[in-house]
Image (cartoon, helix red, strand yellow):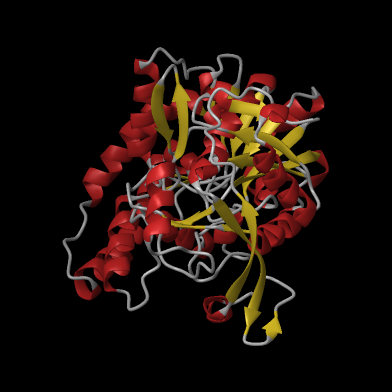
């Protein structure tokens, strides 16, 4: 079982951090393959809630090696803060954390441009303003600055000066903000290079060696499939590929190494930022879900939009990711509802849609069709085996399995590791 890909099956915030932390006890390597510090993976460690933005969620297991792959865009400030936080908790990163020398860096101008563009856009996306989109833009324009560039000061300075000439002109003339000082940035990033030098390596080569040794590797995605730049609800998407295919390009592993694709989904649906959301509940029910589920962004603190489980969207996610099994999280949140609607179809007027639509204009117009299932109205705390769940909760899970055609293999009933059930 060389590679397990853990992918968010909805619009992100599904609880991937906890699931990866749980699975990592049986893994040798956990490798993050895309995104940047716009992600927030929450893990409860020794009773303390910790949010990881760049470092993989396997870091809390001493035997696990953690890799930040080439597909990730790295903010030096965030990375240094995370390393310091972990070391302060007695969690060793030296000799366990490896950073791809091919990973791109988020520069100060990326953050300024991200924030200015979002503020002045007639169609804001709802980004975190942390520079992820502009960093990926520069990557694909082939003007990005990579970790490896820091090794060669002349190359780094030449790239930086060329970029800043353009970025400062944009900041000055288009966004009317202050220009950035090239000398200060050069020194800041050279200091960063000295700090991270022990962590930097050719992670693709490291993973290739691990595959030869048949080590169990977990590829950890950020965000969710419905935010994928190609397959998500464009343009209200992230700037990378959270889908399972992104694991290959974001880590440098072959598709033939992947043997298991685990989708993580909440027992209901949430979304942060703008974009269509067919099952969203904007009234008292939505607020109840938000409060019961603690639905506030781990990275931004923004309240998440909440609604019922959308099986049409989830079936689409299963299809494009090749998901073989599901981890269902926050099932406990639904314990307080006497009835639980589940979206099983989309309709526009008299026409029933066969597939999840490719465009937001259509998705905004759909009317969800619901199947209403009975609630169990009973707390799930303390349950340690799936067969001890209330009958209505078991029927809810079975309904999801039947609709999607894949098994639910894991259940999360709370934030602690011990509140995770493995289903046969």
Judge from the rendering whether residue 303 lies leftward or rightward of residue 119; answer left or right: right
Whole-percent x, y for residue 214 in the image = 80, 24
Residue 101 shows in the view: no
Q: How many marks?
A: 0
Q: Is residue 397 above or below residue 19?
A: below
Q: Is residue 279 above or below residue 385?
A: below
Residue drawn at point x = 65 percent, y = 74 percent? 346
Whole-percent x, y for residue 335 in the image = 53, 41
Q: Nearer the viewer, residue 10 or 334?
A: 334
Residue 40 placement: quadrant: top left
Q: Residue furthest bottom?
A: 350
Whole-percent x, y for residue 73 in the image = 47, 47
Q: Nearer the viewer, residue 287 or 109?
A: 287
Judge from the rendering whether residue 82 lies leftward or rightward of residue 258; answer left or right: left
Residue drawn at point x = 53 percent, y = 65 percent? 279
Q: Residue furthest right?
A: 256
Residue drawn at point x = 53 percent, y = 17 percent? 95
Q: Is residue 269 above or below residue 198?
A: below
User: Which quadrant is the C terminus positioned in?
Assistant: top right
Residue 225 shows in the view: yes
Whole-percent x, y for residue 345 in the image = 68, 70
Q: Is residue 336 above or below residue 271?
A: above
Q: Nearer the viewer, residue 156 or 241?
A: 241
User: Which quadrant is the N terminus positioned in?
Assistant: top right
Judge from the rendering whether residue 187 lies leftward or rightward of residue 148; answer left or right: left
């Amino acid at each position: 079982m060389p590679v397990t890909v853990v992918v968010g099956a909805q619009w992100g915030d599904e609880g991937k951090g906890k699931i990866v932390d749980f699975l990592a006890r049986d893994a040798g390597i956990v490798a993050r393959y895309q995104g940047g510090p716009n992600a927030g993976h929450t893990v409860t460690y020794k009773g303390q809630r910790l949010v990881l933005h760049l470092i993989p969620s396997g870091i809390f297991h001493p035997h696990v090696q953690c890799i930040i792959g080439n597909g990730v865009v790295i903010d030096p400030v965030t990375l240094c803060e995370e390393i310091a936080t972990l070391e302060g908790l007695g969690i060793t990163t030296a000799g366990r954390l490896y950073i791809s020398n091919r990973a791109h860096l988020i520069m100060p101008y990326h953050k300024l441009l991200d924030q200015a563009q979002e503020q002045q856009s007639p169609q804001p996306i709802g980004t975190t303003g942390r520079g992820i989109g502009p960093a990926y833009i520069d990557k694909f324009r082939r003007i990005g600055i990579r970790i490896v560039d820091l090794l060669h000061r002349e190359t780094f300075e030449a790239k930086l000066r060329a970029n800043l000439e353009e970025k400062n002109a944009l900041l000055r003339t288009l966004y009317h903000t202050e220009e950035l000082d090239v000398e200060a940035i050069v020194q800041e990033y050279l200091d960063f290079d000295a700090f991270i030098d022990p962590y930097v390596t050719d992670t693709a080569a490291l993973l290739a060696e691990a595959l030869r040794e048949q080590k169990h590797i977990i590829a950890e995605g950020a965000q969710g499939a419905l935010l994928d730049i190609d397959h998500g609800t464009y343009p209200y998407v992230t700037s990378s590929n959270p889908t399972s295919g992104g694991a290959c390009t974001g880590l440098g592993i072959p598709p033939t190494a992947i043997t298991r694709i685990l989708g993580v989904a909440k027992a209901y649906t949430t979304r942060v930022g703008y974009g269509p959301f067919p099952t969203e509940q904007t009234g008292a029910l939505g607020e109840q879900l938000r409060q019961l589920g603690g639905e506030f962004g781990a990275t931004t603190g923004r309240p998440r939009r909440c609604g019922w489980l959308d099986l049409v969207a989830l079936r689409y996610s299963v299809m494009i990711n090749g998901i073989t099994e599901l981890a269902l999280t926050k099932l406990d949140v639904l314990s307080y509802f006497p009835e639980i609607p589940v979206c099983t179809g989309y309709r526009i007027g008299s026409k029933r849609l066969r597939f999840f639509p490719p465009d937001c204009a259509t998705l905004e117009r759909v009317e969800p069709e619901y199947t209403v299932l009975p609630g169990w109205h009973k707390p799930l705390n303390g349950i340690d085996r799936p067969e001890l769940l209330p009958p209505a909760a078991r029927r809810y899970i079975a309904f999801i399995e039947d609709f999607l055609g894949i098994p639910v293999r894991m259940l999360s009933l709370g934030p602690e590791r011990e509140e995770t059930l493995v289903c046969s």
